[in-house]
Amino acid sequence: MIRRKIQIKNKKGIHLRPSSIIAKMLQKTSDKVVLYAGKQTVKEFSVFSILGLCLRYNDYVLLQIDGPDEQNTIKKLQCLFEHEYDFT
């Protein structure tokens, strides 16, 4: 099992577009993934469950991953959560 704390770097936070990209990636993995943000925990992944975490710029999300491909999954998720989606 891997746990990693990730800081949100997108200036507008994790809004609809990044939530959709992250949800699609999570739905494809066979690893068990849990997201923690503040007092919220997400184990079932959809655009709305990720949006419901209300992740803003500089917030942190804790990723917990357990499975045969956990190293690859954590790398992909870290990249997606740290990506800057908005170019203004």
Image: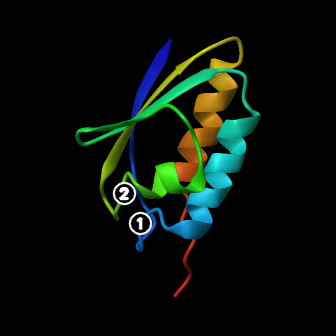
**Circle 1/circle 2 CB separation < 8 Å:** yes
Say which element carries label 2: loop
Kindly indicate the quadrant of the structure image that contains residue 57: bottom left
Q: Which residue is mark 1?
A: 13
Q: Position of residue 86 (x, y in %)?
A: 55, 77
Q: Farthest residue in the right direction?
A: 28
Front in this rendered view, residue 52 or 55: 52
Write down the residue under mark 2. 55
Cα–Cα gap, marks 1 and 2: 6 Å
Residue at the (42%, 29%) spot, across then down: 4
Residue most extreme to the left: 39
**Residue 49 against residue 33 in the figure, above or below:** below
Kind of residue at badge 1? Gly
Q: Position of residue 56 (x, y in %)?
A: 34, 63
* Residue 33, x across and y down, in percent: 55, 27
As drawn, is 57 to the left or to the right of 51? left
| SS category of the residue bearing label 1 | loop
Q: Is residue 15 above or below residue 86?
A: above
- In the rendered image, the vertical position of residue 33 relative to residue 16, given as above or below: above
Where is residue 46 shown, x and y percent of the image?
59, 48
Say what amino acid the circle numbered 2 marks.
Leu
| Residue at image point 49% right, 51% down | 50
Relative to 19, is 27 above or below?
A: above
Q: Is residue 66 left or right of residue 60?
A: right
Q: Work out whether mark 1 precedes mark 2 in sequence or the reverse, and give the earlier one.
A: 1
Q: Tell me if 32 is positioned left or right of 2 in this view.
A: right
Tell me the crowding category of disc 2: few under 14, some 14 to 19, or many 20 or more residues within 10 angstroms, Cα based. Answer: many
Q: Nearer the viewer, residue 80 or 24?
A: 24
Residue at horizontal 30 percent and vertical 54 percent from the top: 59
